[in-house]
Image (cartoon, rainbow, N blue to C red):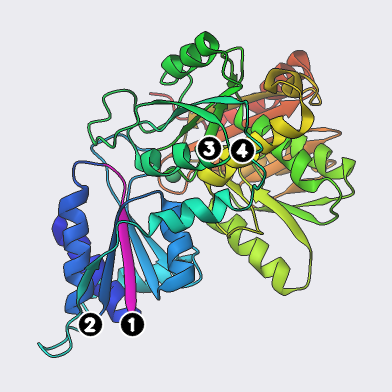
């Protein structure tokens, strides 16, 4: 990701969208150079630019939807420090869809930009305080200080959430203890991906201070993950299930999620008379499906992925880590139970997730189709086989020569057994080197 390429992205976007474009970035060291490049490209093609500084992707999405004609975030999300990228945001606050992204790429490769003359080039404004609107938009949804008396430990990972999540939790009445709370593109405390290993300091902070839970984000804070009060990492499908249980209470409608999500969501949905609508893997497909169902007059109550990326349709149509943090406070305040107790009360689930190298994914899928022709299968993304309450997914990567294999059943034994059954079918197509 070079300034040249980002300049071209800016010129392409400015040629496709007119008006005022909000830009922002995460805390990476290459952020200042790259945001300058995108601003240059946008202004050269006649767009006015508003620079919102360092903020989470969902914060910029919220701000764009309320005030601007488009947006761009310089971020590489959960990826290591040396990466960077551009997320393009549409006027409605959603990420640019595949069709528009292809048109944007075509402009970049053919260098078809509508550069403006001196009278029509754009201007730049700085708006570092606009992020407060996002903080308030979440905090104002939770009146009455639901977090009063609750201690929460927050690891913002030196990323984009430094200016948002601690503030949101404080406004909910929580006593907030923070870790890695200064934006720093060298990520001295932990990597942007919130992994079990990376969050060991957060787990210690939680257990040593008696915090109700710990929360951490990825680099651009569209995802949130949790540590329970005993220091245990909460698997993200379980996080999704617990929050779904609260969100769906008293509502009947649809939960939208990719085919890679745990059956816990299906079980929770059924408990509340809700149904599940499956999409290909990718938050953009979830967000767009939610909007399409709503346009078709369906009632959509919730959406999300089993990686801590949850979408609250009353708030906005994108994954939102700050909103997820606030919802966890509400959940614990409402039930009066500890997080580990709530997790233990979930239906049993044992999952295996593997990545296997192959360039013969399509042959694997055909073999699975044949082997399981007596069982319900969907090919929304790869192939998902359902056997009673158990399921398995074999899904090719869009960009690299491997497939992801996932299996979930209600017990350790059944999961191992189902997994080896799947492996017996796909192993002949695995690369051996
Ligand atoms: Mg992210």
Label at residue 169: 3
Marks 2,3: beta carbons within 8 A: no
Label at residue 297: none
Numbered disc 3: secondary structure: helix
Using a 10 Å C-alpha cutoff, classify the residue at mark 1 as few (fewer than 14 neighbours), some (14 to 19) or many (20 or more).
some
Q: Residue at x 31, y 23 (%)?
A: 189
In the image, residue 276 sits, relative to residue 324, either above or below, namely below
| Residue 46 falls within the magenta-colored stretch | no
Numbered disc 4: secondary structure: loop
Of the residues tagged 2 and 3, which is closer to the observer?
Answer: 3
Q: Earlier in the sequence, mark 2 or mark 1?
A: 1
Numbered disc 2: secondary structure: loop
Q: Quadrant of ligand 1?
A: top left
The residue that label 4 is drawn on is 306
Q: Earlier in the sequence, mark 4 or mark 1?
A: 1
Q: Residue at x 12, y 89 (%)?
A: 117
């Amino acid at each position: 990701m070079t300034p040249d390429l980002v300049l071209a992205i800016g010129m392409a976007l400015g040629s496709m969208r007119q008006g005022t474009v909000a830009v922002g970035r995460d805390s990476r060291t290459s952020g200042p150079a790259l945001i300058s490049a995108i601003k240059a490209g946008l202004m050269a093609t006649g767009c006015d630019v508003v620079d919102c500084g360092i903020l989470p992707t969902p914060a910029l999405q919220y701000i764009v939807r309320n005030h601007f004609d488009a947006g761009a975030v310089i971020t590489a999300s959960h990826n290591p420090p040396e990466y960077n990228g551009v997320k393009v945001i549409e006027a409605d606050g959603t990420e640019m869809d595949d069709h528009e992204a292809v048109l944007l790429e075509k402009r970049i490769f053919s260098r078809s930009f509508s550069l403006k003359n001196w009278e029509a080039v754009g201007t730049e404004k700085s708006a570092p305080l606009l992020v407060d609107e996002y903080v308030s938009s979440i905090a104002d949804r939770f009146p009455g200080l639901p977090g009063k008396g609750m201690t929460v430990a927050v690891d913002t990972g030196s990323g984009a959430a430094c200016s948002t999540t601690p503030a949101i939790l404080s406004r909910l009445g929580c006593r907030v203890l923070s870790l890695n709370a200064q934006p720093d593109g060298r990520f001295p405390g932990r990597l942007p991906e919130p992994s079990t290993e990376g969050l060991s300091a957060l787990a210690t902070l939680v257990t040593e201070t008696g915090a109700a839970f710990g929360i951490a984000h990825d680099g651009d804070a569209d995802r949130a993950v949790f540590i329970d009060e005993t220091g245990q990492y909460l698997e993200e499908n379980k996080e999704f299930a617990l929050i779904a249980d609260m969100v769906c209470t008293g509502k009947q409608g649809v939960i939208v999620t990719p085919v890679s999500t745990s059956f816990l969501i299906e079980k929770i949905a059924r408990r509340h008379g809700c149904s599940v609508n499956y999409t290909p893997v990718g938050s953009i497909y979830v967000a767009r499906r939610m909007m399409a169902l709503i346009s078709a007059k369906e009632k959509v109550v919730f959406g999300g992925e089993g990686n801590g990326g949850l979408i609250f349709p009353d708030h906005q149509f994108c994954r939102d880590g700050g909103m997820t943090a606030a919802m966890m406070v509400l959940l614990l305040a409402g039930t009066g139970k500890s997080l580990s107790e709530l997790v233990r009360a979930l239906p049993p689930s044992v999952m295996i997730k593997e990545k296997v190298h192959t360039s013969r994914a399509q042959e694997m899928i055909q073999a699975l189709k044949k082997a399981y022709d007596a069982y319900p299968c969907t090919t929304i993304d790869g192939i998902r086989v359902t056997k009673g309450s158990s399921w398995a997914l074999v899904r090719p990567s869009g960009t690299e020569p491997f497939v992801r294999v996932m299996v979930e059943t209600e017990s350790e034994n059944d999961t191992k057994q189902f997994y080896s059954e799947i492996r017996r079918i796909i192993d002949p197509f695995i690369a051996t080197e």
